[in-house]
Image: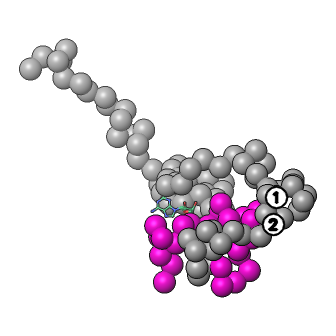
Amino acid sequence: MSADTVNVNGKAKANNTYDAIVIGSGISGGWAAKELTGRGLKTIMLERGRNFEHLKDYKSAAKDPWEFEHRGSATQAERKERPVISRGWGAYEPIMDYWANEQDAPIY
Ligand SMILES: Cc1cc2nc3c(=O)[nH]c(=O)nc-3n(C[C@H](O)[C@H](O)[C@H](O)COP(=O)(O)OP(=O)(O)OC[C@H]3O[C@@H](n4cnc5c(N)ncnc54)[C@H](O)[C@@H]3O)c2cc1C
């Protein structure tokens, strides 16, 4: 086989080798990545969730209570989808999108 037909990327291994891998970009992962990169370690962060843009994606943060369709309450349908969360403080309209649907991802 000639050199022309072999796809040799000599830098691939070096480019894809890391000192640290951080799984998840929440506050714990974010802080870990900050500390690791701050100490000069080559760090990669893997996140399974959707991209969440600071400020732009805070859909409810700047709204007044009367701007919510259900005046801040979770609907019966939302409570049914999230029965565990609905037992506590978390079932209110501004943040229902932030919880997993417990039918897809049972909590207990
Ligand atoms: C609606 C709501 C309101 C809250 N309000 C407050 C508040 O006002 N004040 C406060 O202090 N705390 C609040 N909290 C709690 C706070 O958000 C959590 O304590 C904090 O986010 C936990 O941080 P974490 O990094 O441990 O986990 P997370 O923030 O959950 O981060 C974990 C990350 O890892 C990713 N992940 C998981 N598994 C994988 C995988 N296998 N591969 C790749 N990525 C993966 C997830 O997608 C996620 O992004 C609130 C929580 C919720 C849900």
**Quarter holding residue 83:** bottom right
Tags 1 and 2 touching, CB below 8 Å: yes
Q: Residue 63: percent from the left, percent from the top?
A: 87, 55
Q: Residue at x 75, y 65 (%)?
A: 93
SS of the residue at dot 2? Answer: loop
Q: Residue at x 76, y 44 (%)?
A: 56
When the figure is inspected, residue 55 is found, relative to residue 95, above or below; the finding is above
Work out which quarter of the rendered image holds the N terminus and state it.
top left
Which residue position holds label 1? Answer: 68
When the figure is inspected, residue 104 is found, relative to residue 12, above or below; the finding is below
Q: Residue 45: percent from the left, percent from the top?
A: 53, 53
Q: How many marks?
A: 2
Q: Is residue 100 magenta?
A: yes
Span colored in magenta = 86-108
Q: Residue at x 12, y 16 (%)?
A: 2
Type of amino acid at the residue the image marks with label 1: Phe
Which residue position holds label 2? Answer: 72
Separation of marks 1 and 2 at Cα, in angstroms: 6 Å
**Label ID, residue 49:** none
Q: Residue at x 56, y 66 (%)?
A: 100
